[in-house]
Image (cartoon, rainbow, N blue to C red):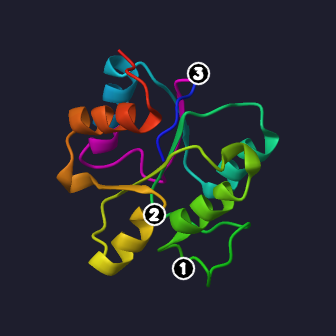
Amino acid sequence: MTQNHKTKKILWVDDSFVDVFHQLMAYEDELKYSGGFDIVKIEHPDKALDILEKGDEVFACIILDIMLPYGTRFNRGETEAGNKTGIILASKIRQRVKYKDVPIVLLTGVRINPETLAEYQKEYHCFFKADITAEKFRDEIRTIVGGNHE
């Protein structure tokens, strides 16, 4: 899943960038200021697909929350009322030739049962917010995108 990229731009889809504990802000700051990445933040999966379909931007990595609103381009049933929208979005991203090899990271605050997690990890990198510091997350992203972004 690791691949070298010329870009240092990350697409990050999460509907809770204004989180109570400012955890996402800490991750973002580490990626931007210590990691040297440009972050494109999107709060809705429909808009993320619009950006990817337009194809004007190249991303080194895509970070997705698992629980997202299902919007108009996703079926409420397939997303389990939003509980798996990030997984369905990841699958739709993989169907696009341009993004089939771009690393996808699932970052969630919700614990996933071990069997489901094992399935996700076959194709995606998975992290629980409670288990990873901002510095460690930055280092993991650096490793995932295959470059030493000092």
* Residue that mark 2 sits on: 66
Write down the region rendered in magenta: 6-25
- The residue drawn where x is 31% and y is 67% is 110
Task: Give me the disc on residue 81.
Answer: 1
Tell me which label, 3 or 2, sits earlier in the chain. 3
Give 34 or 99, whichever is nearer the viewer.
99
Residue 43: give x, y in percent of width and height.
55, 49
Q: CA distance from mark 3 to mark 1?
A: 37 Å
* Residue that mark 3 sits on: 6
Q: CA distance from mark 3 to mark 2?
A: 27 Å
- The residue drawn where x is 77% and y is 31% is 56
Q: Tell me: 21 left or right of 86.
A: left
**Residue furthest to the right:** 54
Q: CA distance from mark 2 to mark 1?
A: 12 Å
Tell me which label, 2 or 1, sits earlier in the chain. 2
Callout 1 crowding tier (Cα within 10 Å): few <14, some 14–19, many ≥20: some
